[in-house]
């Protein structure tokens, strides 16, 4: 495995580990069904670099999802594969993270794409 591919795999694993730390029913869980809808917005980071958010609480996945940051051009060439699958785009996956984590990981995605394009 080339160094770049290894870096991407480690990065992908780091993102999944962050998701697993927060996911449903964990002690630091972001999905809290007993919360009111505006109490905990849920952020998704997609494998194409897009970040979205929606209301959390008991309405999570029952309401509109809003774009926070558009996809990253050529991010699909990194072949990132996250935990959750989408129903509407074949091969697109996502993780549930904090807003800050989404932004940090997206920034690093952009850096990897720039590295790849050099």
Image (spheres, grey):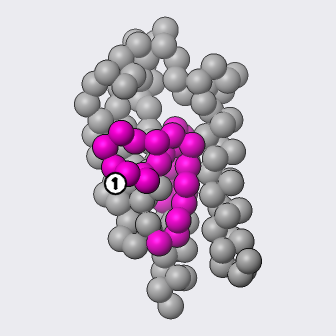
Residue, x 44% and y 32% (percent of image)? 42
Whether residue 13 appears in magenta in the rendering, the answer is no
- Residue furthest to the top: 34
Q: Which residue is mark 1?
A: 69
Q: Quadrant of the N terminus?
A: bottom right
Quarter of image, res 41: top left
Q: Is residue 68 visible?
A: no
Q: Which residues are magenta?
A: 77-106
Q: Is residue 34 above or below residue 88?
A: above
- Determine the residue positioned at 42% across, 59% down: 48
Residue 68 at what x, y percent from top left?
33, 48
From the viewer's perspective, tell me whether residue 80 is left or right of residue 14. Answer: left
Q: Residue 118, how many percent across, how many down?
A: 50, 91
Front residue of 81/112: it is 81
In-image side of 41 versus 67 (left or right): right
Front residue of 80 and 53: 80
9 displayed left or right of 75: right
Q: Is residue 49 shown above or below 94?
A: below
112 and 83: which one is in front? Answer: 83
Residue depicted at 54% across the width and 60% down the height? 80
Q: Front-most of 105 and 6?
A: 6
Q: Position of residue 32 (x, y in %)?
A: 52, 17
Q: Is residue 114 above or below residue 80?
A: below
Q: Which image quadrant is residue 24 in? A: top right
Q: Secondary structure at mark 1?
A: strand
């Amino acid at each position: 495995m080339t160094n770049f591919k290894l870096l991407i795999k480690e990065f992908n694993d780091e993102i999944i580990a962050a998701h697993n730390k927060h996911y449903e029913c964990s002690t630091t869980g972001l999905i809290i069904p007993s919360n009111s809808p505006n109490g905990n917005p849920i952020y998704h980071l997609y494998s194409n670099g897009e970040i979205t958010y929606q209301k959390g609480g008991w309405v999570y996945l029952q309401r509109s999802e809003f774009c926070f940051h558009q996809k990253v051009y050529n991010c699909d060439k990194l072949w990132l594969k996250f935990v959750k699958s989408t129903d509407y785009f074949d091969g697109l996956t996502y993780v549930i993270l904090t807003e800050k984590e989404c932004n940090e990981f997206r920034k690093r995605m952009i850096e990897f794409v720039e590295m790849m394009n050099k």
